[in-house]
Image (cartoon, rainbow, N blue to C red):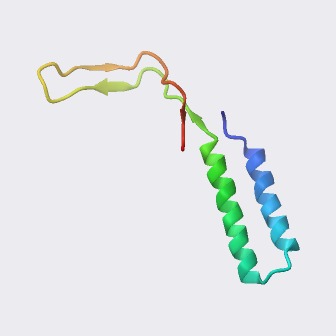
């Protein structure tokens, strides 16, 4: 899935609004904000699907059968965990 920037923006805005309306002390509010921002950014990054295009150079080494070439098809989608 492609990264969806408006979703990240809405999560960040929600975290700031929550901090403004909280009745806790400043230090606790800052810690909560940092946690919420970290969670939003972590989720945003992990929502990416990575596909490596064909044509990436590949090589084997260390034996007489060492070969060079290139990938011929896109990789299967990879998801960051």
Above or below, 64 against 49 in this view is above
The quadrant in which the C terminus is found is top right
Residue drawn at the location 14% of the way across and 30% of the way down = 62
Residue drawn at the location 68% of the way across and 74% of the way down = 31
Q: Nearer the viewer, residue 68 or 39?
A: 39
Task: Provide residue 47's location: percent of width, then percent of height.
Answer: 64, 41
Above or below, 28 against 60 in this view is below
Q: Nearer the viewer, residue 61 or 42?
A: 42
The quadrant in which the N terminus is found is top right
Residue drawn at the location 78% of the way across and 46% of the way down = 6
Residue drawn at the location 69% of the way across and 55% of the way down = 40
Point out the residue furthest to the right here: 21
Task: Provide residue 11's location: percent of width, then percent of height.
Answer: 77, 54
Occupied quadrant, residue 34 = bottom right
Task: Provide residue 23's location: percent of width, then percent of height.
Answer: 86, 79
Residue 77 located left or right of residue 18:
left
Residue 40 located left or right of residue 79:
right
Task: Provide residue 30's location: percent of width, then percent of height.
Answer: 71, 75
């Amino acid at each position: 899935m492609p990264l969806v920037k408006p979703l990240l923006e809405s999560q960040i805005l929600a975290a700031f609004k929550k901090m403004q309306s909280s009745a806790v002390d400043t230090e606790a509010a800052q810690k909560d904000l940092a946690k919420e921002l970290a969670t939003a950014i972590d989720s945003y990054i992990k929502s990416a699907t990575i596909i490596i295009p064909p044509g990436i150079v590949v090589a084997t080494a260390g034996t007489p059968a060492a070969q060079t070439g290139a990938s011929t098809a896109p990789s299967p989608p990879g998801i960051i965990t």
